[in-house]
Amino acid sequence: MRDAVSAEQQAVFNRGNNVGVLAQQLFPGGVDATSGKRSNNGESVKRTQELIASGSEVIYEAAFQHDRVLAILDILVKKEGKWYAYEVKSSIKISQTYLLDASLQYWVITNSGLTLEDINLITVNSQYIRRGELKIHELFNFTSVKKDALKNQEMIKENIDRSKHVLEGFSIPDISIGEHCFSPYPCDFMKTCWKNVPKNSVFEISGIPKSEQFNLYNAGFTTIKKIPKKNDLDKNANIHIEAIKTGEVKVDLVGIKKFLEKVKYPLLFMDFETFMPAVPIFNNTKPYQHIPFQYSIHFKKDKNAAVEHFEFLAEQGVDPRRSFIESLLKDTETEGTILVYDVLMERNVLNGLKNDFPEYSAVIDSRLKRIIDLVQPFQERSYYHPAMKNSFSMKNLLPALVPELNYSNLKISSGSIAMIAFEKLQKETDMFKILDTRDHLLEYCKLDTLAMVKVFEVLEKEVLKLES
Ligand code: SF4
């Protein structure tokens, strides 16, 4: 049975559809070949042929079929009597997978009887900066991929023949799980094929190549406990293996103390949420730029003080950057260390805001200087819990260190879901839905910084425990 589509996957599909529809404006006045019911591909193929025959020169969602293989092309255009194919990708880069997709489309279209003068991929131009109205011709890049498509024709034919042979057979091919389950994307059938992979399998060691995981698995070392002491894995993977085998938490008092000595009260535990619209919504922003829209800060005056909470969530539909930075600077005025967890995003956002608002550059710098990354003692394995699975994501760390706090009951339970939720709000008009989403966003971001407070307290307690 096919796995359910996750909220993150659905958001990627929606983004692709939205960018595809926008790109139609590059060739305005076209006719959509989609039949009333999207699933009726046969009708779409027929309608495409009718549109071509009746003289349509721009066709959206043009459908073709050859040798029982269907291809649906985003935009088909006739210029000076010649046909040009355009496939739209919401990405900024052309991947090998896109080239293979285009090659398959070329094979189906040309073999179905239409000669193509060229086939192009339309991608998002990462260098485009929105200034005022959206300039659609500057937002997209065109790349001819006909050469690649021609080069791949024989291979496409062979693969189609092989697939047909499988489909015509009476049994499911006996293929074991392997690296192919992740290439080019994680397969939709993993819940079925991977159901016999045991708990604590070698695949639960993050940070090592898939090829190494499969080497171990295929050699019979299916679970971490079976991996021999002498192996080719790196030091960090072996720390995880050891932790799983012994079930013990590794605590390096010297490392933790060294980290804690750098941290000065009062403490601010800070976390940002950003969203990255493929098509820039606000002036002076680029495609996929991180736009900060929310932060949460927990404040602790001294070791024994109760925590206070500050938060910011931008209004939807307006550029949040100025109000975000002005509010943040106010809420971080006090002295002391600013703790973040995995600093890269926060640092990038603050550096980006320095460019956007040069008048705040010096004061943003003063905040940047106070930031210390709470991930450090975990990354350096000064504290290592078997449940961390060689990964330092807060989602792994929290259930291990602070089981009473967890993300599982939250409607918004990850940064990527928060990102999708806020992007959706930009067009939402239903006030109940807006308020509901905002509540969930606030709840999620607040938990992120409360989690940091609790994780930090665990480190402090470890030092106390071992010293006493
Ligand atoms: S073996 Fe892997 S790639 Fe093949 S169907 Fe199963 S999960 Fe998908």
Image (cartoon, grey):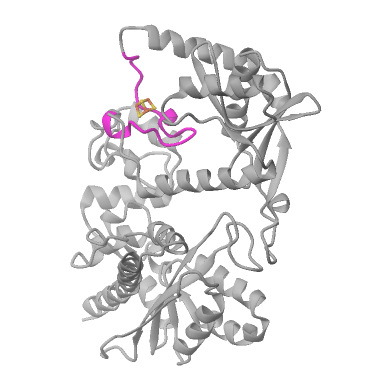
> Which image quadrant is residue 82 in?
top right
In the rendered image, the vertical position of residue 248 relative to residue 71, given as above or below: below
Residue 174 within the segment the image draws in magenta: yes
- Magenta-tinted stretch: 172-192
In the rendered image, the vertical position of residue 324 relative to residue 400, given as above or below: below
Residue 399 within the segment the image draws in magenta: no
Residue that appears at 52% across and 44% down: 16
In the rendered image, the vertical position of residue 208 relative to residue 316, given as above or below: above
Of the four image quadrants, the one with ligand 1 is top left
Query: Could you say where residue 403 lies in the image, as x and y percent from the top left?
Result: 20, 64
Residue that appears at 46% across and 46% down: 14
Furthest toward the front, the residue is 54
Front one among 432 and 301 = 432
Magenta segment main secondary structure: loop
Query: Could you say where residue 143 lies in the image, as x and y percent from the top left?
Result: 72, 37
Furthest toward the right, the residue is 80
From the image, which quarter does the N terminus lie in?
A: top left
Residue that appears at 32% across and 91% down: 302
From the image, which quarter does the C terminus lie in?
A: bottom left
Q: Is residue 90 visible?
A: no
> Which image quadrant is residue 258 in?
bottom left
Query: Could you say where residue 9 lies in the image, as x and y percent from the top left?
Result: 41, 45
In the rendered image, the vertical position of residue 392 relative to residue 317, given as above or below: above
Front one among 239 and 360 = 360
> Which image quadrant is residue 294 in?
bottom left
Front one among 21 and 209 = 21
Query: Could you say where residue 225 lies in the image, as x and y percent from the top left?
Result: 25, 41
- 185 relative position to 284: left or right: left
Residue that appears at 41% across and 28% down: 39
Front one among 71 and 446 = 71
Q: How many marks?
A: 0
Q: Is residue 199 visible?
A: yes
